[in-house]
Amino acid sequence: MTKALRWAIPLAIFIVLVAFLWVGLGRDPRQVPSPLIDKPAPAFRLSKLQTPDETLASGDLRGTVWLLNVWASWCVSCRVEHPLLVQLAQQNVVPVYGLDYKDQPDDGRAWLAQHGNPYTASIVDRDGRVGIDYGVYGVPETFVIDKTGIIRYKQIGPLTEEVLQGRILPLVRELQR
Amino acid sequence: MKARVALALLLLAGAAAATEMNPPQQSSDASGMSALDLRLKRLEGDLRCLVCQNQTLADSNAELAADLRREVRELAVSGKSDEEIKAYLVARYGDFVLYDPPVEPLTWMLWFGPFALLVVGGTVWWIVLRRRERLASSAASPSGANSAEQARKLLDDGDG
């Protein structure tokens, strides 16, 4: 073994290690990739928050591209993303449906009255079963669902301007075509 | 570069605060240990809680873990096997819920990496040992005047 090699090998191992750690530490461990991407959105039929006598089923939304935003009145980081959703609703580009997750309907309605209601409709997932079907583990979460009812994107945690403008809206426009 | 470091720090700091999963109301269940309880306990020990990621479903106090335990219990009561219950959770949350990830191309590094490293390390060790042995044996039987000369010179230097 030449002297150069004696240096090169540990250096190469070190560089590989640093590269792995660099990438590994840059990742958010909370962003667990969802197995539901490119799979049909799980079916549900739940009563609406504002009009409890009516129900909404996932099948009712066939033929439209829509967003499903999982929120709750007890969720503090939902307040962070909420203004973005309100803004989005005013632009009228894509209907946003809300899943009021493990919440008291009264609290949910009061919360929307206070912070504004960007949702075409919100549905009540009182015991969190639909949330489990959608693999929800950290509220807020947002799904992009296409015309055929396939989940195309999932955002875990609050929406940001970057994610909305950079990922979600371009995807929505492409799916709406 | 700087932005990357800042982002990494921000993610670390924000990870805990960014998402939440604990509605105020707490649910609790009292349990005597039946055969079903024991089976569930074992099964939940193999499953990871998504909220507090280093705890098992059995150990976690998170609201979601309680919901998932309820779900697992109902599936078990309805006669589903352990494998079916795991498949149910994997379909929703991915392989991440399993503490034993399946062996597939993506996880080969994880499963076989340590053994590959052991083989590489063992080979290097063996090569080094053999080289040393050869050096030692060639030093023990100095061939020619040249090495004898060198040895004398070293000894002289040491005395000097």
Image: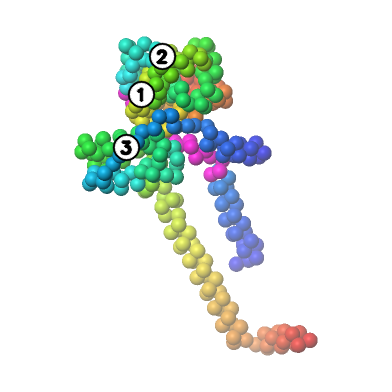
Say whether residue A125 is magenta.
Answer: no
Q: Position of residue B100 (x, y in %)?
A: 37, 48
Depth order, front residue of A76/B85: A76
Relative vertical location of residue B127 with respect to residue A67 in this rendering, above or below: below
Alpha carbon distance from label 3 to label 1: 19 Å
Q: Which residue is mark 2?
A: A121
Q: Which residue is mark 3?
A: B29
Kindly indicate whether the residues beneath marks 3 and 1 are on one polypeptide chain. no
- What's the residue type where badge 1 is placed? Arg
For the residue carrying disc 3, how many other residues have a C-alpha within 10 Å: few (<14), some (14-19), or many (20+)?
few
Q: Please tell me how many numbered marks the rendered image carries.
A: 3
Q: Which residue is mark 1?
A: A126
Quadrant assignment for the N terminus of chain B:
top right
Kindly indicate whether the residues beneath marks 3 and 2 are on one polypeptide chain. no
Relative side of B129 to A135, left or right? right
Q: Mark 2, chain letter?
A: A
